[in-house]
Image: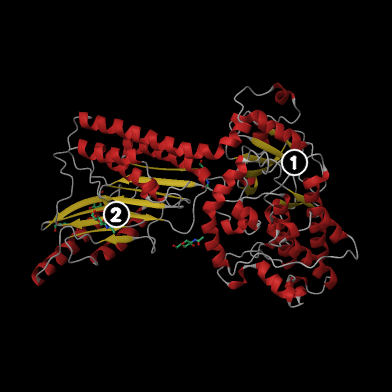
């Protein structure tokens, strides 16, 4: 489901917006001056309900103060920030009306990660990062040299207009910068002007923004009307008096028309909300059917030793002090904590609440708890009665493998022996998940940040088994979509086919990364981007050992290196049936003289920029495939049987 284009926008809502206009005789200045949507990334659909909630918060704020900003979920990979700001000459009722209309236009930008709508009376924006102090953006700032009032024709008119407009612009921008609310209007020789900085922008920022806006808007002369649509401000001049005449703006309270407008707006809102909720619901319907259990928290949970008290975990992590954060995942932040008995644990604070499916969640925790292997991070228990759901894991001190690959903050160089040991351990852990116990678990998110290292540099796989109730961390934005997708098997990425062979593929990518000492996809736009391709090329020309991390110098055996790289290539073959099972991989890596089949070509993507394009093209498909994999999780989901 996508929201792109106004055609999918609910018809009723459009109707109501048209009605809104006819009920009001004041001028809320609702004509659109411009809309800018982000282009190159999309939001994951799970954030959409959050977006709707935020708009409701902002509605409240705007109706009280004339502006409002809000944000959510800043502790995880995805956040959403929103800001709405009426230009201050609008009386409160008009402001609310203008806001509601801008707010109804904004979702046409979804599912892009950002959107802005400038009306002539107000501004609204959402984005995936904290933009509140932002003032200018050379890509997105625009001017609208409107032709609605024509242009000055004769030379003398043009000169007069330019002089008057120039003075007026200087006058209003100076005044706006000096005012605490960043707003000023003015009138000079029949020209009207308005400058408004967003309320979240600092005085200095307001100055920068308006300076740039004045420069830009002068480019519209000799037009009689123009607007600068900036990241941190709005500036307009016009020969038409568009300013609200405050003598007319009465304070007689809500008129009948306004009440009708508000009632309609509320209906519009609830419809938008229902529509969005419907979409979100459709997605998680099956999952919820499995997981929802509105009954009371089961007694078995209360008595269980897996039940951690929320207060204890709160104290253990010093009330979730940010300095105790040791990791970030798609489902929440991970804190280090010390329990009253002195035991050090890792506490994962889930970003969405599991209260509605407590029993199901607890059952899974119970099952996963039973899985013990030296290469798997042990789940100790959970807390589901407090305000947030928490998972408690054993603490693994040496951080995650990706931090040993990171060029900038590399912790230490792993020797060849250590790397091989880590790869064998990871393979053993995965083989165990795939079939070593009574249950079969597909991890579906194997990557270097999910492989932790203990005090002896033994690999421990994290974050497995709960995927049925939690989202797999694949559409999250800040760590880079491409980063996580670089590990995804092509059949899973494109068709949503999930078998343990998807884990084998991700493992293969991990092998190549660890041996070569760099990430599969570097986000830099050079052609060194795609590691799989580089290794394959070297392999076909018999120089595969050249792919080895150059930092290792002579401390390795060339036979071992080429064997391990060959195994990595075997795991990343495009054909699912050709990939070895994880137990085969363990055999190949640990048994001397074990014959290793010839690998076929891995799936190719020419460069990292083509990967980005591919990623954005497939994201919509991916979204659908996630739904279908959630829908069929009893047959092909990450499952336990
Ligand atoms: C510029 O503003 C006018 C008047 O509101 C509007 O009709 C027009 O669509 C705007 N132009 C763009 C490119 O948005
Ligand atoms: C998206 O485009 C903007 C410029 O329009 C650029 O700054 C940003 O880095 C791009 N993001 C990605 C992931 O390509
Ligand atoms: C997250 O939100 C809290 C307030 O709820 C704020 O104090 C904190 O600075 C925010 N963190 C980030 C990284 O934005
Ligand atoms: C604005 O313009 C008016 C009229 O020209 C002038 O009297 C006033 O001093 C100007 N104010 C500023 C801050 O430039
Ligand atoms: C700035 O505002 C103060 C009062 O708020 C006023 O005294 C001063 O004249 C203003 N300066 C300009 C340049 O408008």
Where in the figure is residue 491, as x and y percent of width and height? Answer: 64, 55
Camera-side mark, 1 or 2:
2
Within 10 Å of disc 1 (Cα), the crowding (few <14, some 14-19, many 20+) is some
The reply, left or right, for residue 422 in relation to residue 331 is right
Residue 227's x, y, as percent?
A: 25, 58
Q: Position of residue 388 (x, y in %)?
A: 60, 34
Q: Label 2, on which residue?
A: 234
Q: Which mark is residue 84?
A: none
Q: Quadrant of ligand 1?
A: bottom left
Q: Residue at x 76, y 77 (%)?
A: 543
Q: Earlier in the sequence, mark 1 or mark 2?
A: 2
Q: How many numbered marks are there?
A: 2
Residue placed most toward the observer, 441 or 70? 441
Q: Secondary structure at mark 1?
A: strand
Q: Mark 2 and mark 1 in contact (Cβ < 8 Å)?
A: no
Q: Is residue 636 above or below residue 592?
A: above
Q: Position of residue 61 (x, y in %)?
A: 36, 37
Is any atom of residue 410 visible in this view? no
The residue that disc 1 covers is: 344
**Residue drawn at (68%, 54%) of the image:** 449
Which quadrant of the figure contains the C terminus?
A: top right
């Amino acid at each position: 489901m996508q929201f792109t284009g106004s055609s999918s926008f609910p018809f009723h809502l459009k109707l109501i917006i048209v009605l809104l206009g006819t009920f009001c005789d004041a001028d809320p200045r609702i004509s659109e001056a411009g809309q800018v949507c982000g282009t190159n990334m999309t939001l994951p659909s799970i954030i959409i309900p959050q977006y709707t909630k935020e708009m409701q918060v902002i509605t409240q704020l705007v109706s009280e103060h004339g502006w409002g900003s809000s944000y959510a979920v800043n502790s995880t990979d995805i956040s959403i920030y929103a800001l709405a700001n009426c230009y201050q000459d609008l009386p409160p009722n008009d402001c609310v009306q203008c806001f509601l209309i801008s707010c109804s236009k904004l979702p046409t930008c979804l599912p892009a990660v950002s959107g802005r709508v400038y009306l002539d009376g107000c501004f609204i924006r959402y984005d995936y990062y904290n933009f509140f102090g932002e003032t200018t953006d050379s890509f997105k700032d625009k001017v609208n040299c409107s032709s609605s009032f024509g242009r000055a024709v004769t030379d003398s008119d043009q000169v007069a207009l330019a002089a008057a407009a120039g003075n007026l612009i200087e006058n209003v921008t100076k005044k706006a910068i000096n005012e605490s609310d960043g707003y000023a209007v003015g009138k000079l020789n029949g020209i009207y002007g308005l400058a408004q900085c967003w309320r979240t922008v600092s005085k200095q920022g307001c100055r920068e923004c308006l300076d740039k806006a004045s420069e830009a808007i002068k480019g519209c002369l000799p037009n009689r009307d123009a607007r600068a649509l900036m990241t941190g401000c709005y500036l307009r001049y016009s020969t038409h008096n568009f300013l609200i005449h405050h003598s007319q703006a009465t304070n007689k309270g809500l008129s009948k028309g306004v009440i009708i407008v508000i009632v309609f707006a509320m209906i519009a809102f609830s419809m938008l909300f229902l529509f969005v909720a419907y979409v979100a619901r459709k997605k998680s319907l099956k999952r919820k059917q499995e997981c929802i259990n509105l009954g009371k928290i089961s007694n078995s949970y209360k008595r269980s030793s897996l039940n951690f008290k929320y207060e204890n975990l709160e104290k253990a992590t010093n009330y979730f002090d940010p300095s105790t954060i040791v990791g970030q995942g798609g489902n929440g932040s991970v804190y280090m904590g010390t329990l009253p008995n002195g035991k050090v644990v890792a506490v994962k604070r889930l970003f969405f609440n599991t209260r509605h499916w407590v029993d199901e969640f607890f059952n899974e925790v119970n099952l996963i708890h039973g899985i013990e292997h030296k290469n798997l991070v042990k789940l100790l228990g959970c807390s589901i009665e407090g305000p947030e759901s928490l998972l408690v894991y054993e603490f693994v001190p040496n951080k995650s493998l990706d931090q040993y690959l990171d060029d900038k903050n590399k912790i230490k160089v792993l020797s060849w022996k250590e790397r091989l040991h880590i790869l064998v351990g990871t393979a053993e852990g995965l083989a165990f998940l795939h079939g070593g116990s009574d249950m079969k678990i597909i991890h579906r998110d194997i990557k270097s940040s999910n492989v932790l290292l203990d005090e002896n540099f033994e690999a421990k796989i994290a974050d497995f088994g709960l995927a049925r109730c939690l989202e797999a961390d694949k559409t999250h934005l800040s760590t880079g979509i491409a980063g996580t997708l670089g590990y995804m098997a092509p059949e899973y990425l494109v068709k949503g086919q999930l078998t343990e062979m998807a884990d084998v593929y991700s493992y293969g990518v991990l092998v190549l990364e660890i041996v070569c000492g760099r990430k599969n996809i570097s986000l830099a736009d050079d052609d060194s981007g795609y590691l799989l391709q580089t290794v394959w090329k070297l392999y076909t020309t018999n120089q595969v050992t050249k792919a080895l991390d150059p930092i290792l110098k002579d401390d390795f055996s060339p036979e071992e290196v080429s064997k391990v790289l060959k195994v990595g290539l075997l795991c990343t073959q495009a054909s699912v049936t050709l990939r070895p099972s994880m137990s085969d991989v363990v055999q190949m890596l640990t048994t001397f003289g074990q014959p290793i089949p010839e690998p076929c070509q891995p799936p190719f993507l020419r460069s990292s920029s083509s990967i980005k394009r591919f990623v954005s093209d497939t994201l919509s498909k991916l979204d659908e495939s996630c739904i279908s994999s959630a829908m069929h999780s009893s047959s092909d989901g990450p499952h336990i049987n």
